Image (cartoon, helix red, strand yellow):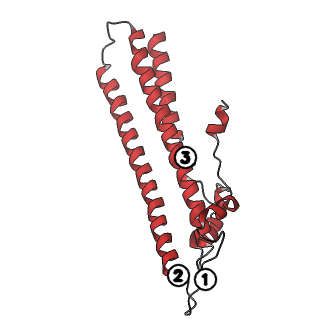
Amino acid sequence: MNLARYLRPTTVAIDDVRPALWTGAGDAQPQPTAEGSHPAVLLEQYKIYVEMADRVSARRGLTNTFFLTLNTIIVTAFGTLWKDEPRASTWFLAIPAVALLLQCVAWFWILSSYRQLNSAKYIVIGALEERLPASPYWRAEWTALGRGKDPSRYWPLTHLEQWIPVSFAVVYIGAFIVVVSA
C-alpha cells in the first residue's frame, strides 16, 4: 500500500463527472423553457446539493471542535495531574500515549475523508452550474481564488486543518520522550 497516495489530495476531473451526472438520454442538456430560463427542477436540485455540501462542511467543523476539545481536556488533565512525578513506571504511559496517537491518526483520516467528500461535491456543483445561467462558485469564486493553487490569494482551510492533529501527535510524542528519558 502506498501511504503517499492517501496523504496527498487528489480530485477527479470535472470531465469525468459530467457523463455520470445526467440521467436519461446520455448527456442531454436541459432545454430552456419558453421564457428562456432553465427548468426549475435543475435549479432545485442545485440548491439541495449545495445545501448538502454545506452540511458536510458543518459536520467537519463539529468534528474539529470535538477533537480539539478532547485534546485540550487531555493536555489540561495531564498538566494538572502531573504536579508530582508519579511513583509507577513511566512506561505505563505508553498505553495512553499510543491511544492518544491513534486518536490523532483517526482525526487526521476523518478530516481527509471530509476533504475528499467536499472536493467531489464541489466538482459536481461545478458541473451543475454549467447548466445554469450563472456559475458563481465554479467559474467566478473559484477562479477569483486562483483555484486554491496560490496561497497568497487563498489557502484552503482543509490544507491547514490537517496540521492540527499532526501537531497534537508531535506534542504527545515529545512529552512521552521527555517523561521517559527523565
Quadrant of the rendering where the N terminus is positioned: top right
Horizontal and vertical percent for residue 22? 60, 67
Q: Nearer the viewer, residue 62 or 128?
A: 128
The kind of residue on which mark 1 rests is Gln
Horizontal and vertical percent for residue 98? 45, 21
SS at circle 2: loop
Residue at the limit of the structure toward the front, as seen here: 25
Q: Nearer the viewer, residue 85 or 58?
A: 58
Q: Earlier in the sequence, mark 2 or mark 1?
A: 1
Q: Give the number of the mark in front: 1 or 3.
A: 1
Q: What residue would you read off at disc 1? A: 31
Quadrant of the rendering where the C terminus is positioned: top left
Q: What residue would you read off at disc 3? A: 160
Residue positioned 42% across, 24% down in the render: 99
SS at circle 3: helix
How far is disc 3 from disc 2 in space, using C-alphas?
39 Å
Residue 39 marker: 2
